[in-house]
Image (cartoon, rainbow, N blue to C red):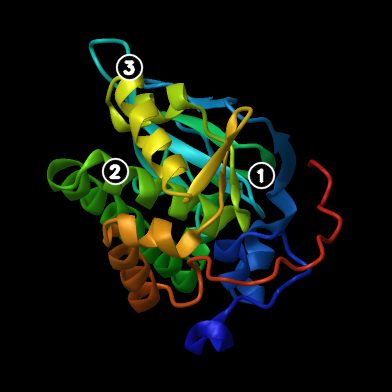
Amino acid sequence: MAAQQYLPTNHNRPFNNLLRRLSDADFKLIEPFLVTVTGASDDLLYNPGDNVEIVHFPCGPSLASYLVPNEDGRDVETILVGREGAVGGIVSHGFLPAYTRITIKVGGPFVRLRIAKLEAAKAKSPTLRNLFARYADCMLAQVFQSTACNAIHSIEQRTAKWILSAMERTDSDLVPLTHEQLSTMLGVGRSYASRVIQTFKAEGVLETRRGALLVRNRDALALRACLCNNAVKSHFEEVLRGVYPIEEAQPAQQPLSSAK
């Protein structure tokens, strides 16, 4: 692909494209304060109202999810964040109450950095500050696109879009997702979500596994999806070229630094 030349190449760093996009000088400003942890699916990172003190960088196939609680007790997902970015204190400068619930959607390695250390590094480096400002712009673009998508696209289109988005970030045809999780994520009843999955299954697009969906025909799934993912990827390429995950082989994992 044309974007291949812009892919982050710092494979001695954690497998997070945003961290690998940093210059050596900027990465050294935060490297001593990075803490590596392993998160499990459904682990809670923030509840609404929590003080945002730590930014979390998903690495490799790890995924985090922003969820907006509603008065009926359901959480509706707004965006997924994988190795292209980070969650917590990115759009703001941190130290503010979290507005959404942030959970781990797909477990795996995460790198944590205290907001105070990130802000101190930003104060020293205009280039680091600029990169995170551009990522904040990309994240807002995802939120805007998600809002438009929820308003105008069908449940079928949104389901196909979400599955494709998860596949891109995890480099896997097996997406950990139950019918209950899908219904909550899309803000619809479980029976509706199950009908959509059964339709895709009958058409040979995917199969169901225990707690997961196995995609059998990615091209057919893409035909059923809206174009919202493409719009987000195009914006990423304009603002932070090479950061959004593309079809690439995951490099061999280097030993992650120990907690500090």
Q: Residue at x 33, y 20 (%)?
A: 191
The CA span between labels 2 and 3 is 20 Å
Q: Secondary structure at mark 3?
A: loop
Q: Is there any visible trace of residue 98 in the rendered image?
A: no
Q: Is there any visible trace of residue 182 in the rendered image?
A: yes
Please name the residue that numbered disc 2 is placed on. Answer: 156
Front residue of 58/146: it is 146
- Label 3 neighbour load within 10 Å: few <14, some 14-19, many 20+: some
When asked about the image quadrant of residue 229, the answer is bottom left
Residue 199 horizontal side relative to residue 110, left or right:
left
The CA span between labels 3 and 1 is 26 Å
Q: Earlier in the sequence, mark 3 or mark 1?
A: 3
Please name the residue that numbered disc 1 is placed on. Answer: 110
Please name the residue that numbered disc 3 is placed on. Answer: 74
Front residue of 95/249: it is 249
Residue 193: percent from left, percent from top: 35, 29
Mark 2 or 3, closer to the camera: 2
Front residue of 167/47: it is 167
Q: Residue furthest top?
A: 72
Up-down relation of residue 47 to residue 242 (above or below): above
Q: Number of labelled discs? A: 3
Mark 1 or 2, closer to the camera: 2
